[in-house]
Image: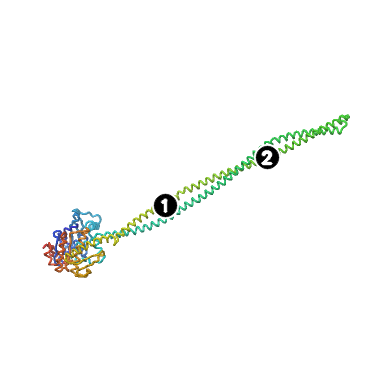
Amino acid sequence: MLVFQKLRYKNFLSSGDSFTEIDFLANNTNLIIGSNGSGKSTILDALTFVFFNKPFRKINKPQLVNSVTEKNCLVEIEFNNNNRQYLVRRGIKPNVFDIEVDGKLLEKRGDDRDNQVTLEENILKVNYKSFTQIVILGSSTFVPFMQLSAAHRREVIEDLLDIRVFSSMSSIVKDRVRTVRDQLKILELKKSSLKEKGQMQAKFIDDITKSGEANINKKNESVKRHLLDQQQLQEANIDVLGKIDHLNAELEELKGAGDKLRELGGLKGKIQQKITTLSKNHKFFNDNKTCPTCTQDIDENLRQTKLTELGVDAKKLKGGYQELEAAIEKEENRESNFNDISAEVLELNKKLASSNSDISNINKTITNLHSEISTIRESIDNQAESKENLNSIIKNLKSSVDEISNLKVEMEKHQFVNELLKDGGVKTSIIKKYIPLINKHVNKYLQMMEFYINFNLDEEFNETVVSPIHERFSYASFSEGEKMRIDLSLLFTWREVARVRNSINTNLLIMDEVFDSSLDGFGTEEFLKIIRYVVKDANIFIISHKTELYERFDSVLKFEKERGFSKLNKK
Ligand SMILES: Nc1ncnc2c1ncn2[C@@H]1O[C@H](COP(=O)(O)OP(=O)(O)OP(=O)(O)O)[C@@H](O)[C@H]1O
Ligand SMILES: [Mg+2]
């Protein structure tokens, strides 16, 4: 609970160089009186100045310094919040802004603005607007709740119920939703571009693989064809070898014909010599009856015998010669055969050699094809760079997809929270929860003032009023005094709600001529009644010109001007 203890100020507006001090805790009900300009409302300015660095009324900061003393304008407040003792000191000429916590000066980290934020958000937990709606009420600035616009009513209630935070959260969440949506758009674009890239890369790899495989198939076909050719050549070679074997066997048979011919030739020569000799002898005996050398006659018998013998020999030689001729012809045939076959074998061997060279060429070609095939296979299997590229694309794509799904989950959460934070969401359900409590309190206070109407606010903070006389009344229908009762009821209701919500739970209530104009004799009594009720644990300060109130308060504080300076005296 925020317990205000003491306020003191000097050289502030009409106060002089000695402190004017107000002890908030001394009495529960306090009446502050004094003639016009005596310095009563100054208390409100001092309070908002010391806490929020601006006076309650619209006065420039330099104008807050007393115009006579012109320096050392200083306001101090002592208060306790949740068992911590605080003192805040603020001054002009010189500028002062100190916060003491349990007697220790709070260190100033940045400039005074940081400490101001600390004071409002961490120490007081009340902002200027709520402070001037719940703690101090001035006649000039206090606008009764029912006279606020719908938007302002909502603002006050949200403040009161401590749910304004949902509005700021809502705008943060909306921002986040926008950011996430933008991020998602970018990621979706990235994803589709990666997908395209990946498909291209995969197609590239596939194309290379397919064309490589086709090439390998072609080369394998070529290998097959070459093997077939090779086989045919080998088979033909076997044939040729068979033929050569056969011909060699024939040659074996025909071997020696030359030698024999030479031998027969020699024989033929000898026979021809013999025939020549024989023919010479035959011619001699035939032609000569007398020896040409010795001229003796040759015996006719002998000559005839010689001619016959020579004829027989000639016949014999002729037979032998014919035989020899036949034998020579035969051998000549054999020799020619031998030569023919030899030529054929030579030819066949040539053919074999060429075929063998073809076979070895084919072997080379096949080896080359195999090595080409393995090179292609290697290049298919080993498209390292492309595959690495594809892998990194896939990896990127995967991480984009993950990121997208994470963002979508986040988006869903945000949208859910956004839904909750919308005016119709959590806030409304909290407000809804409090509306019956609010209505209950308002009507309780109204009854305490013996104003028997049934006043109800709805979630939009529009009122319906049912009175014994009228079925449907609105706030505007009532007289000023009646309106005041409703305003008071609402005011105290806000304090009750604030206490329940623990948003602004304070002992202090200062009202500066707020209801003076609408307080008639009757209203005053009710006003006092309700104040008494609230007073149980509060310190109330009523600034009023109503003389009839004097006797009804625990204490009366009187402001007076002495030698141009405001002074506070107790009565
Ligand atoms: N800088 C200043 N130096 C000295 N006096 C000032 C300064 N600024 C305002 N004043 C005077 O201080 C007084 C203000 O007092 P305040 O408004 O507190 O009077 P009040 O008691 O509330 O009077 P009322 O009953 O008319 O509301 C006025 O007389 C005003 O002229
Ligand atoms: Mg005043």
User: Looking at the picture, how far across and down is residue 410, in whole percent?
Assistant: 34, 56
Residue hosting label 1? 394
Measured along the vertical axis of the image, is residue 63 above or below residue 201? below
Q: Which mark is residue 341?
A: 2
Measured along the vertical axis of the image, is residue 346 above or below residue 417? above
Mark 1: secondary structure:
helix
Mark 2 CB near ligand 1 (8 Å cut): no
User: In the rendered view, does 287 fall on the left or right side of 438?
Assistant: right
The numbered mark, 1 or 2, whose residue comes first in the sequence reads 2
User: Looking at the picture, how far across and down is residue 401, in whole percent?
Assistant: 39, 54
Measured along the vertical axis of the image, is residue 87 above or below residue 350? below
Mark 2: secondary structure:
helix
User: Looking at the picture, how far across and down is residue 13, in whole percent?
Assistant: 17, 63
Q: Specify whether residue 122 is in view.
A: yes
User: 535 or 473, which lies in front?
Assistant: 473
User: Looking at the picture, how far across and down is residue 412, in whole percent?
Assistant: 34, 57
Q: Specify whether residue 152 is in view.
A: no
Do the residues under discs 1 and 2 have CB atoms within 8 angstroms? Answer: no
**Label 2: few (<14), some (14–19) or many (≥20) C-alpha neighbours in 10 Å:** some
Image quadrant assignment for residue 227: top right
Q: How many marks?
A: 2
Q: Quadrant of ligand 1?
A: bottom left
- The span from disc 1 to disc 2 (Cα, nearest Å) is 77 Å
- Name the quadrant of the N terminus: bottom left
**Label 1: few (<14), some (14–19) or many (≥20) C-alpha neighbours in 10 Å:** some
Q: Amino acid at mark 1?
A: Ile
Q: Amino acid at mark 2?
A: Ile
